[in-house]
Amino acid sequence: MKSALITGVTGQDGSYMADILLEKGYKVYGMIRRSASPNLWRIAHILDKIEILYGDLTDQSSLDNILRKVTFDEIYNLAAQSFVQYSFGAPVSTTDITGVGVLRLLEATRQYAPGARLFQASTSEMFGKIQETPQKETTRFYPRSPYGTAKAFAHYSVVNYREAYKLHASCAIMFNHESPRRGEEFVTRKITKGIAEFKKTGKKLSLGNLNASRDWGHARDYMEAAWLMLQQETPDDYVLATGETHTVKQWLEKACEFGGVDFWDAYTQNPAFERQAEVDYLKGDYSKAKQVLGWEPKVKFDELVKEMVEADEAFINNSLPR
Ligand code: NAP
Ligand code: GDD
């Protein structure tokens, strides 16, 4: 039986990765950090099937101990401070977790688990102020936030450890991916949850820049690609995207349509949600992943918005546990 460690297992992607690996018959270990309140709703349905290990990307000894204690075939690093807006207010801690945290994990892997295959969650935020369209593996990075610069550091660290120490380490440059398990501060989920609340209470959504364009896919699709990447003989980096782009306004319009709400009624514009430096336009070219991994995203824009609108309607009206 193969064994895998998932960091960030309490997050959106980590929870889907755990589902996928359990379905494939893996022994799954999820790394979590201590929290004052329970934060396990995304993995509540599988808590009895996975083993929890305590660790923190900011603490080298916790990572060393985990990799010394258990032998893993695969390590999926999905942990990060992942909210771009927050990173402007907390640049140092974001860099410590999202950037240097990856170096700590690489060091622990090099020393205690050099045979394990490692996946790193890189991001289209590294393209930032884009240098070409669509963005592919060779497009020059131009990050626009402390989160983006930390991820670029992490990305190059993984490439360097792959080349210097022959680690089987791969990065997916993932464009935005969403799901009903998405954190509530990200714009897609903020909108779908906000529409359900607006229908119930009349409280309008408060949003920032509606003109930014994103290439939105489904988180589960991207985690299936993550697994495929670690099954390859040769480690490598891949763009994961849908190849389509839509504005935030288009997401809002589509969500209003599925929610049965008038677009002009549902929101107000609030500069507080605008970024110090914005990433205006992202559109990925996933042809390398298609060619080498045989991967293609299954869920497209309309289906994704609909799934999230319906899930949030059920969440708000039945108060599903979250
Ligand atoms: P998420 O929902 O924000 O989950 C982040 C996870 O990281 C949570 O489990 C969180 O734990 C954990 N974490 C945060 N700080 C940590 C620390 N110091 N030590 C250990 N764990 C820590 O993010 P996601 O959307 O699933 O994204 C997964 C990964 O993909 C992240 O690295 C993200 O940057 C990257 N990514 C995401 C997207 C996207 O569109 N979703 C696109 C490109 C790349 P708590 O629950 O305790 O906070
Ligand atoms: N969060 C948020 N809240 N964003 C808003 C709002 C708002 O009220 N109004 C407009 N936006 C715009 C942002 O300015 C941004 O252009 C866009 O909506 C998307 O914002 P987020 O959903 O916060 O995601 P992100 O694109 O900044 O970052 C996500 O995707 C990255 C991959 O490109 C995160 O998941 C990152 O972790 C990930 O790396």
Image (tube, helix red, strand yellow):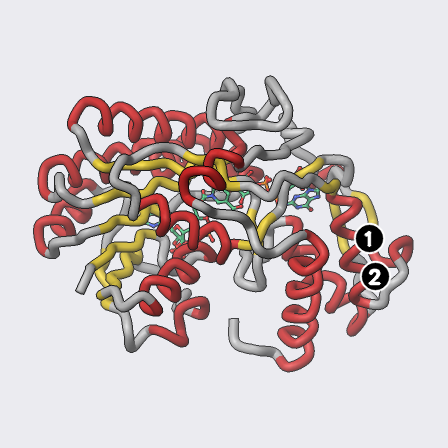
For the point 61% across and 78% down, the residue is 319
Instruction: Give the spatial CA distance, label 2 vs label 1.
Output: 6 Å
Which quadrant of the render holds ligand 2?
top right
Where residue 57 sits: x, y (%)?
28, 44
In the displayed structure, does residue 141 sit left or right of residue 189?
A: left
Mark 1 and mark 2 in contact (Cβ < 8 Å)? Answer: yes
In the displayed structure, does residue 295 sit left or right of residue 67?
A: right
Disc 1 designates what residue? 253
Position of residue 54 relative to residue 319, above or below, is above
In the displayed structure, does residue 299 sit left or right of residue 169?
A: right
Where residue 141 sits: x, y (%)?
50, 21
Density class for disc 1 (Cα within 10 Å; few <14, some 14-19, many ≥20) is some
Where residue 237 sits: x, y (%)?
38, 33
Give the label on residue 103, or none: none
Disc 2 designates what residue? 257
For the N terminus, the image quarter is bottom left
